[in-house]
Image (cartoon, rainbow, N blue to C red):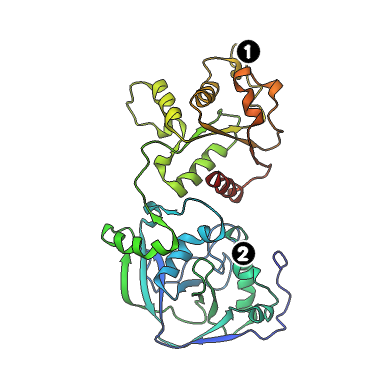
Amino acid sequence: MPEIPPPPRLTGTPAREVVAAGSTFHRVHPATRKAHLFDPQHSSVFGGGRFDACIGADHRTLCMSAAPETAIAERFLREFALAECNARILQRTALTGQVLTEVRSHTDLNLIRLYYAPDLAAVHQDPWLTTTTPNRFHVTREWAEWLHREVPWADGILWQSIADMPRQTVVLFDDRCAAPPATGTVRALDDPAELPWLIDLLKPYGVEVNPPPPSAPRYFLNFRTGDAEAVPELLHRELVRRLGERAVFYDVRSMRPGLPDFAETLENTVRDCETVIAIVGRRWETQTNNAGVRFLDDPDDWVRRELILARHNDKKVVPVLVGLRGALKPEKLPAELRHLAGTQMHHLRRGYGDHDIAVLVDELLRD
């Protein structure tokens, strides 16, 4: 029942799970916010977890998990659990300012259990509610708000973590119960002293923590300013988030100040990288310089030079088509670039968003 809104009234009987006082949980939160404070409300569309409270709701939420690895997986590894990707790398920059705290409930917690198929059927749903991907969380949050309204006895919701099956994850409602206080271990996840512990914790998940930076960028972004919309910026941001800053070359923003030879740096980077991503907008073949010469025919044009250099050095080139445009046609390309028309391409359709960029990166990492 992926996209249907909640019904006007709940007609089933939700499964109730009572978590006894004194139970231990773990939560990841910013170091600037105490563990016992409920989280701020989130946008109804962007950010937030599966069942977090949205702006305008009459309550706030707090997420916690049954084990430390589950709390970390829910916060940082959801993407790995829900998408195939060769690189399962947790960048230490993502851990900056984040703390893992052990908390303990001081009262019994009455929770809506969404663990089994009958549990979900009782609230007019199916496994989609607890397994769908983050890009649909704006819908699951709508259902959570409805459950909060329809089940007055509920202190929160209990479900199975998809990122760390089958361990439990819980969301509490601040108008029904107090947050469990911190009573145990507190770990600053960006503390170098905690790194060996974190590496050992995540090793069974096939996740590496901040591997050594590459000696050369893995990806080189080739694009023409004004033709590719916001794609270079969005693609750079997502690749850096997954692989780290040094894995992606993004024009002058990836060059250290004071380099003596701009041209030599660009050419060496193309020679050393693994893959050149050619971002192709609607005017890619037709744009001209001030003299009226088509850029792709100008020997001094950097987009052309980088692509020819990649060809001569046997680099993989992946064209990414943007928006309302068709595939590359060999008859519209200079002889040196006609091979691109026969290359496997990716397409970001009109109306693309963050989710489409993430899917594209998944595909690039699988290639």
- Image spot of residue 287 (x, y percent): 63, 21
Above or below 257: residue 191:
below
**Which residue is pictured at 65% across the width and 68% down the height?**
128
| Three-letter residue code for mark 2 | Thr
Q: Left of 175 or right of it: where is 1?
A: right
| Three-letter residue code for mark 1 | Gly
**Which residue is pictured at 65% across the width and 24% down the height?**
285
- Image spot of residue 120 (x, y percent): 65, 77
Instruction: Name the foreground residue: 119 vs 30.
Output: 119
- Image spot of residue 173 (x, y percent): 52, 77
Residue picked out by circle 1: 292
> In which quadrant is the C terminus drawn?
top right
Badge 2 element: loop
Question: Mark 1 against mark 2, which lies toward the viewer?
Answer: 2
Residue picked out by circle 2: 132
> Callout 1: 10 Å neighbours few (<14), some, many (20+)?
few
To which quarter of the image does residue 26 belong? Answer: bottom left
Above or below 105: residue 233:
above
To which quarter of the image does residue 341 belong? Answer: top right
Q: Report the label total.
A: 2
Q: CA distance from mark 1 to mark 2?
A: 51 Å
